[in-house]
Image: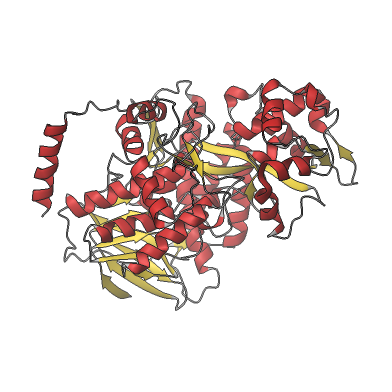
Amino acid sequence: MKERIIRTVVIGSGCAGLNAADTLSALGERDLALVTDNLLGGTSRNTGSDKQTYYKLSLAGDDPDSVGDMARTLHRSDVHGDIALCEAANSARCFLKLAALGVPFPTNGYGEYVGYRTDHDTRRRASSAGPLTSRFMTEALEHSVKNRGVEILDHTLVVRILTDADGVTGLVCLDTRAMEWLHIRCAHAVLCTGGPALLYRGSVYPAGQCGMSGMAFEAGAAGANLDCWQYGLASVGFRWNVSGSYQQALPRYVSVDENGVEREFLSEALGPVEAMNMVFLKGYQWPFDPRKAEGSSRVDILVKAEEDRGRRVYMDYLHNPAGYDLALLSEEARQYLLSCGADGATPIERLRAINAPAIGLYRSHGIDIGREMLEVRVCAQHHNGGIAVDADWHTDVPGLYACGEAAGTFGRYRPGGTALNSTQVGSLRAAEHIARRSTRQVRDTRTEAQPPLVPAGDAAAILRKLQGDMTRCAAFQRDAAGMRGMLEEIGGHLGRLMPPDLRDPQLTVRLRLRDMLLTQREVLSAMLFSLENDTEEGVLMTRSGVSRRVPARPLPERDLWFERVWQAYRARAERTT
């Protein structure tokens, strides 16, 4: 096994990983490398929605807003107050850094970053650079990272986090081009591997996103709110969220059986006018929400019911839904369409008026929604839980940090766009903690730097089977008996491990399957606990398959007297120097 010594290693090349590396370098960290299995892969680079949202403090208009107000929006019974305050306090700073790096967030003629309201919020805090906002972010951050000369180890898959009683000691990696093992001795590891996308078959995550949270759980890190996921309607041929304007253009929903017989099932179940109003609301209320099971989330429930009947579901932009009449719509829907000039005769005309790039996006992937119906499904879209962290995005394993979707900083309900803000704030906080407060150094300890044992059998078949089971019984509709059966099966696979073989054509799949099994075990345990315990108060903590709720930390009392803060700031800077 080859060996490297690198004080600080950032794992992952999405928005969080690139910003962690960029900020560490800017703060003077020179013994640094970014390790990624695919520099151009992952969710940040390859996913989006109609207008992908960045959620931050209001920077335009006359509506009152403050760090405290935003923190109170983010802080709930299952979200820690100090984390909420950090995400609010640093949101404008991180947003403006991205704008300075060239991410094209729009301004009005006076330079205000005008915002809009997103789901689970009442303020106009949301901004967007279009459907590819997170891609623009990764491109801008990658350019900055390369300009700084940060070392990037591409095609390098981290598969094991090595620890001892004092925390992180190193990483075991697989060079997927040379098919060689690499041991990196390090003092800090910043895990930015994204959400555990492999868990579900019904998924809107891009094919290049897998996630590697299992190795953190194996290393001793706890999980937070692992039961909390965001599910929503997405296209399946080309994986993309069909939120916002895709719904507000009021397409026709149809299901088709094996004989090609169409059924306009929403209109049948809800009535034509109610169906149109519910579809419109899905634009604002895109994620499935059990509190809206009698409202806009009935759309998700009815789509899933058609799937359970063996029918395929489509959104049709060629034809109006049954009974379409602008005058019959709710006042909110009618005024929105009129304000957008979207009173066209067909859904595709209305979508073109609201958001023409949304049509071009599908066309660029070989799908013309002006000529063919778009197949959709309710899919896993984002993990609102993850690895438990503190206000510096430090896990309870010393030296191990988790940022972005890998971190469990959200609960059941997060305003849309907070995920992108969290990638930047979390990686900023972790980088500052490492550069300014950590005294950890690479130690001359010799750990068991061995590759992990991997599952036996046909890895690809096992992975597909468990993904299907997860979608069937542990998605937005959950079945306790099915989840217990899955846990038993996962335990069986983890009990039949074998040494890895570099000549094995399934080796990379086996390594990813192993991590998926470790993650599914923790997630299913949390889901069963949540299902079988009525209370939703507190943050759900899970470690080695055992869950418990702990009270969310309150919003901190903080000193806002300038001279005292300035004095403390200067003292910290002197200690760092």
Report whether 423 appears left or right of 435: right
The residue positioned 63% from the left and 52% from the top of the image is: 465
Quarter occupied by the C terminus? bottom left
Position of residue 211 relative to residue 221, above or below, is below
Residue at image point 60% right, 32% down: 284
Q: Residue furthest front?
A: 109
Q: Which is nearer the eye, 444 or 395?
A: 395
Q: Position of residue 435 (x, y in %)?
A: 21, 54
Q: Quadrant of residue 264?
A: top right
What count of labels does the image hold?
A: 0
Q: Does any portion of residue 388 appear in the rendered image?
A: no
Q: x, y percentage for residue 221?
A: 33, 46
Q: Residue at x 68, y 48 (%)?
A: 356
Q: Is residue 528 shown left or right of residue 299?
A: left
Can you say whether 35 is above or below 109 in the image?
below
Q: Nearer the viewer, residue 222 or 267?
A: 267
**Is residue 67 in sight in this rendering?**
yes
Using residue 337 as the reference point, say whether residue 30 is left or right of it: left
Residue lying farthest to the bottom in this orientation: 178
Relative to residue 381, is residue 172 depicted above or below? below
Residue 55 in picture, x, y percent from top left? 45, 39
